[in-house]
Amino acid sequence: MNNGNERKERSERHERSGHPVGGSGAVRLPHVTVARTLRPWIRGLVVAAAPMLLFALATGFFMALALLVFAMEEGGASMSMYAFPLAKALVLLAQGVSFHAAGIVVGIVPLSLTFLLILLVRTFTARLCAKPQAWVSGTVLWVAMSLLCTRGLTVGLYDDGWIVALKSALVFTIGFLWGSLPSSALRLRAVGYLHSHVSEPVRHTVLSGLFLGVLLLGIYALVGLGTLVAWIVLDHGAVGTLFDLLGVKTWSRVLIVVMSLAWLPNLVAWALSWLFGAGFSIGSLASFTLWSGSGSDLPSLPVFGLFPAAVDSLAVINVVMTIPLVVSAVVAVVALLWRRGFPIRLRGRDQDPDPKTMLVSFAYPAGAFCIAAVVVSLLSSLMFLLSNGSLGEGRLKDVGVDVLASTQAVARPTAMGLFGAWLAALVVTAAVFAVRWALASRRAAASNAAPVAAGDAGETTRKNRTVSNRKTGNDSSATVETAASPRRPRMAKSDRAIKSDPAKPNDHTGGENKAPRRVNSTRNAKENQGDHEPTTTTGTGIDLS
């Protein structure tokens, strides 16, 4: 079994290297090497052709259905012959190529179709081939098919051929990179280089900043979508009125609404700009903000009936304009407390805080918040720029938002919320450390003062005992000696012991010679001795004179 596996592996290795398989008499098969060389080029052609054909067929069938329904409800002639040219025009429009027909300009890129086209390219790239050869062959075929779509159109194009080729190549490249980079060797080498040359905290900071920026922009997109839904709920009556003025029947209305979903991201971007205070405009005919808005001068297009009027309540305006500030602050607080983010956690009460460590721990989230603010600014600028377009050559030339004003309306409060939360966390942490330091200093001072207070209290007690003993007639010198130093045991010498050393003076009275003390061997109390001795002796018979 092992020999069979070894022969199989050796055969595959020889086949990959182009060497003859088997013994010296084996014949080399050149077509195997040629097939392996041509395989990525062929797969690149499939990666380009399959998404384009699927997208064109889907849009073509939908346009044919829509034209058929329009003709049936309106009672006119069939317009199915326009389905294929309109499908080609939509393929070009999804790649940013504008067209015009009968005085009507369609220059607003349907971002939903653009995203769908890029997603198809990404899917086929990830499934089939992600090599550079596939990108080269796929790009060539994709550009060729895009240029082919410019032939036989019933509408006119605004862009020249080289601009069409450049835009189509950019769309295909974005989808190809999206599908190839996650599993590419270049990405693996880049990740290995970063892991070996960049520290883990720095990598975590950069990745967290990118994630927070994308997360915030996603939340803002959801807020914009909710605003658009509110417009639809509040102003659907105006849209129905415009449909009635145009004489559009029920199924035609349904198909027009479905077709309008192609521009859903554009409307979300406009709604977001309006909600955050920047607003948007339909050429020079109308401008919509929180403070003003009127669509009376606009053409009778049903989508224009969705656009809102001015908000009357100043409180509501102030609340909705603080949404990016509040959202970014909440996200920052969660990032500062989340275990996988930047957990600024205070240590135990008995542990001394390290100021240097805490400053470093606060520096990393500050860097991540800077990156997040930059990401929000760049991506929001790109989103607002792509959402703009044109609907005519005169007063409807510039339709959409002011990119600079809208970006500032989103990015500025976002940065304020992020760094406001960071500063608040820093102040709270510093206050907690200050309180702990004060309490620790107070406990240390109390612990140092406790032995001194205990010594003073003991000395005071001994002095009080001395005064009490003086009042009762005890020897003052013995009491003072007791208060000054620990009591030493006194030894009573018998007459024999005293007489055995006559040359040594008696030291008990400071060097003066006195008569030896008389010791009564009777162990009874003074009152029970019966010897009627004077009271200059103690109860045990020791003479005190």
Image (cartoon, rainbow, N blue to C red):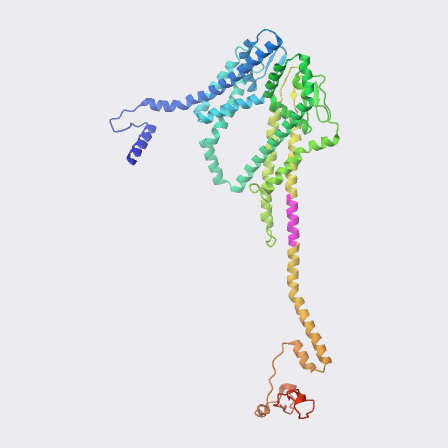
Q: Residue at x 55, y 22 (%)?
A: 114
The question of residue 431 being in magenta is answered with: yes
Quarter the C terminus occupies = bottom right
Which segment did they paint magenta?
A: 425-437
Quarter the N terminus occupies = top left
Percent coordinates x, y for residue 452 in the rendering: 66, 67
Location of residue 164 (image quadrant)? top right
User: In the rendered view, does 8 fall on the left or right side of 360?
Assistant: left
Location of residue 412 (image quadrant)? top right
With respect to residue 495, does 187 lie above or below?
A: above
Q: Residue at x 70, y 72 (%)?
A: 460
With respect to residue 385, does 339 lie above or below?
A: below
Q: Which of these two is toward me, 366 or 312? A: 312
With respect to residue 64, does 129 lie above or below?
A: below
Percent coordinates x, y for residue 270 in the rendering: 65, 25
Asked if one can make out residue 282 in the rendered structure from this viewpoint, the answer is no
Q: Provide the major secondary structure of the magenta segment.
A: helix
Q: Residue at x 32, y 32 (%)?
A: 9
Asked if one can make out residue 450 in the rendered structure from this viewpoint, the answer is yes
User: In the rendered view, does 20 fall on the left or right side of 185?
Assistant: left
The question of residue 113 being in magenta is answered with: no
Percent coordinates x, y for residue 441 in the rendering: 65, 57
Q: Residue furthest left?
A: 25
Q: Residue furthest top?
A: 77
Q: Which of these two is toward me, 386 or 321? A: 321
Percent coordinates x, y for residue 429 in the rendering: 64, 47
Location of residue 479 (image quadrant)? bottom right
Numbered-mark total: 0
